[in-house]
């Protein structure tokens, strides 16, 4: 089992540019989550998919953020246009869903917007 | 709104010096309480799930306990390789998502 795979590991971009983060969940997991981690706010849920359908996007900061899951093995998080305050580590996680199912995290994408 | 508060923010121990990390929570119906370990530059790694007050789980030098308002992660005779940030999270009834605390950064010196 390769675990959750995220790319790129690091992304440096200029304010106003579009950024796309990618995630491959663990095969067989039907739930996928995007979290953002900062020193100030810790880990915050951005969006949650179940069976490729967005269930809870209440954590998405604003319309500049969008997420898709076109199939069970791939998801993207897009920021357009990016701003310096978007700088953070973005994690993707997947789980089998249901009570007590742990989330399995990727190693994250460190985004720096200058 | 679900809330998770962890203390202390940082803890420095000598190798072999046992201690406990605290996780206080408020949640609208607890479905599960989770402990994770996070190493620098890595994603959180799952340790335990606790479901009800009085439950305990152990893994090597770590033992997690749960009451109706808080959870403790006890570290017995820690080693330098136990140095990491430990995260606590709650899952509310009817939901699959987790709400995380900000973590306790543990440093164990040889």
Image (cartoon, coloured by chain):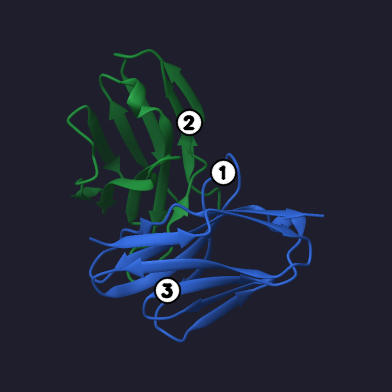
Chain colours: A green, B blue
Secondary structure state at the residue bearing disc 1 = loop
Q: Are marks 3 and 1 on the same chain?
A: yes
Left of A31 or right of it: where is B55? right
Disc 3 to disc 1, C-alpha distance? 26 Å
Secondary structure state at the residue bearing disc 2 = strand
Disc 1 to disc 2, C-alpha distance? 11 Å
Left of A23 or right of it: where is B64? right
Q: Are marks 3 and 1 in contact (CB under 8 Å)?
A: no
Residue that label 1 marks: B42
Q: Position of residue B41 (x, y in %)?
A: 58, 39
Looking at the rendered image, the disc whose residue lies closer to the viewer, 3 or 2, is: 3
- The answer to whether residue A100 is seen in the rendering is no
Instruction: Kindly identify the residue that appears in the image at 43 percent across and 63 percent down.
Output: A102
- The answer to whether residue A49 is seen in the rendering is yes
Q: Position of residue B35 (x, y in %)?
A: 50, 64
Q: Residues within 10 Å of mark 1 (few under 14, many from 20)?
A: some
Looking at the rendered image, the disc whose residue lies closer to the viewer, 3 or 1, is: 3
Residue that label 2 marks: A110
Secondary structure state at the residue bearing disc 3 = strand
Residue that label 3 marks: B70
Disc 3 to disc 2, C-alpha distance? 32 Å
Chain letter for mark 3, please: B
Instruction: Kindly identify the residue that appears in the image at 39 percent across and 33 percent down.
Output: A22
Q: Position of residue A16 (x, y in %)?
A: 29, 13
Left of A81 or right of it: where is B51? right
Q: Is residue A67 above or below residue B11?
A: above
Q: Are marks 3 and 2 in contact (CB under 8 Å)?
A: no
Q: Nearer the viewer, residue B91 or A6?
A: B91
Q: Position of residue A26 (x, y in %)?
A: 45, 51
Instruction: Kindly identify the residue that appears in the image at 24 percent across and 44 percent down.
Output: A59
Q: Is residue B19 above or below residue B7?
A: below
Q: Nearer the viewer, residue A29 or A14?
A: A14
């Amino acid at each position: 089992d390769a675990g959750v795979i995220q790319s790129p590991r690091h992304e440096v971009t200029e304010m106003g540019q579009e950024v796309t983060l990618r995630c491959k969940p663990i095969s067989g997991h039907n739930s996928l989550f995007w979290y953002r981690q900062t020193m100030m706010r810790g880990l915050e849920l951005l969006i949650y998919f179940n069976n490729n359908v967005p269930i809870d996007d209440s954590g998405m900061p604003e319309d500049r953020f969008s997420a898709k899951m076109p199939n069970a093995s791939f998801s993207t998080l897009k920021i357009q246009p990016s701003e310096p305050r978007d700088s953070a580590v973005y994690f993707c996680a997947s789980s089998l869903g249901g009570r007590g199912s742990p989330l399995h995290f990727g190693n994250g994408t460190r985004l720096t917007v200058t | 709104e679900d809330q998770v508060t962890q203390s202390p923010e940082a803890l420095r121990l000598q190798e072999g010096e046992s201690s406990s990390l605290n996780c206080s929570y408020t949640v609208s119906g607890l479905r599960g309480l989770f402990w994770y370990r996070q190493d620098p530059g890595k994603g959180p790694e799952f340790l335990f799930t606790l479901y009800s007050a009085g439950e305990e789980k152990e893994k090597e030098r770590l033992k997690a306990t749960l009451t109706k308002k808080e959870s403790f992660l006890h570290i017995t005779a820690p080693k330098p390789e136990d140095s990491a940030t430990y995260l606590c999270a709650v899952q509310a009834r009817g939901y699959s998502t987790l709400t995380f605390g900000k973590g306790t950064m543990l440093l164990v010196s040889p």
